[in-house]
Image: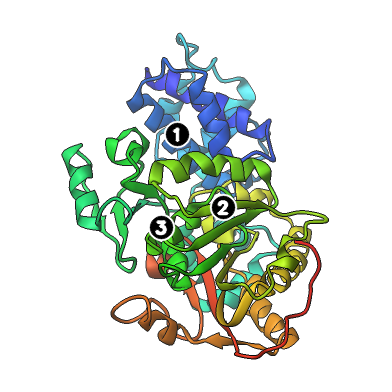
Amino acid sequence: MTPPARVQAGIDLLEATAAAPRAPADSVANSYFRARRYIGGGDRRAIADRHWAMLRNEARLAWALKRVRAPITSRTLMLAQLVAEGTGADAIAGLFSGAQHGPSPLADAERRALHALAELGRDAAMPAEVRFGVPSWLLPRLEARFGAALEAEMAAMDAPAPTDLRANLLKSTREEARAALAAEGIEAEPTRFSPWGLRLEGRRPVTATAAFRDGIVEIQDEGSQLIALLVDARPGMRVVDYCAGAAGKTLALAATMGNRGRLVACDVSAQRLDAAVKRLRRAGVGNVERRLLGPGERWTKRSAEAFDRVLVDAPCTGTGTWRRNPDARTRLREEDLSELVAKQAAIIDRASRLVKPGGLLVYATCSLLSEENEAQVMAFCGRNGGFGVVPLEEAWKTVADGVPPCDGNFLSLTPARHGTDGFFAAVLRRSSGAPPPADGGAA
């Protein structure tokens, strides 16, 4: 593709994303490229990289357009992005020449906007929420969370995420998986904290490799791997993944259990549980049963106090995953947070009833917000005196060598400090002889 054709494709993809505001941007992009299989791999990567950059920069691009009193359209957003990339005004105008498969020539208003953008530069008056690309209601919470480190954390959120893989211990060791990838021309390095993890820089076609097709590796962020590690699921145990989704952590738990014992993957979505079947089969997992939860289900009550380990990977704002899902920043509303906090409390109350005396409950999110994390855990412990927090250092000693990634009682990961997505996890132990936890209602 010519440079103008790439620009037009970027405009088209931005319009497709805007037309589906509630759909994840990656699914929109996948559909866009599937419908245009004539676009080669190099062009696809270039278009996609610019698209993700525009989603990360969207608040800043829109602010710049407002400052120069230009309309905000897919074309003007592209102009602002090209200026942000350092492309000169004349060169940008040349990309909008009306050449075959390229964008049509700039209208007079667009040409004026382009030259105004080129002269604007980086304005020191840009509000902090615009500079960081976060909703204004969320900024005080992030400032309280990170303090002086906020600039570094938001910069890390703007950087492209690496590709992390988990070696499937049911089929290989980490070194064997690394060698299998290397044989296909993909170099990977061991992750810093996870004993199963491998890291690739940038986006690589992992799903096209034999190592992936044969179930030797799974795509999973290192932080997500560490949550599964902290569950400490062992062979012969009875374990529940209460919010399993498409079973990413279920697969890791099955591997630590060596396919021995009972592992139940629960979710309120039949579609997500059905999607897990192919992944479980590819990974060689044979000890998982799927359980659909919902209004009127009785399984949770019938299974009270029956499990050694229960993982609650709760639905959350996903603020820790913004470097992978930059479009989620603009979709998040303050009322979403309030609704999620209430839902999380109900879920953890109900799931905790499954934990037998002496067993572990692991509560986790991919959120950076204390309302969903520390505050949620402490509120649960206040309602259920039979559970106590296991300090991270103590929990870490049972599952891994060396020093844990974080100080304090909880696993609290961020892109800037740990190179992972933002994750939180708390390990809670139910005391022997503790009364049944409070019933928080249906999940």
Q: Is residue 154 above or below residue 92?
A: below
In x, y percent, where is residue 343?
75, 64
- SS of the residue under disc 2: strand
Please state which of the two labelled residues, at mark 2 or mark 1, is closer to the viewer. Answer: 2
Q: Residues within 10 Å of mark 2 (few under 14, many from 20)?
A: few
- SS of the residue under disc 3: loop
The kind of residue on which mark 2 rests is: Glu
In x, y percent, where is residue 92?
45, 27
For mark 2, what is the residue?
289
Residue lying at 49% horizontally and 22% vertically, measured from the top left = 34
Q: Is residue 26 above or below residue 177?
A: above
For mark 1, what is the residue?
48
Q: Residue furthest top?
A: 100
The kind of residue on which mark 1 rests is: Ala
Colour pattern of the rendering = rainbow
Q: Nearer the viewer, residue 265 or 287?
A: 287
Disc 2 to disc 3: CB gap under 8 Å: no
Disc 1 to disc 3: CB gap under 8 Å: no
Find residue 266 and report its image quarter: bottom right
Q: Is residue 351 visible?
A: yes
In x, y percent, where is residue 43?
37, 25
For mark 3, what is the residue?
259
Lateral position of residue 229 relative to residue 443, left or right: left
For marks 2 and 3 on the same chain, the one whose residue lies earlier in the sequence: 3
Q: Is residue 11 visible?
A: no
The kind of residue on which mark 3 rests is: Asn
Q: Quadrant of the C terminus?
A: bottom right
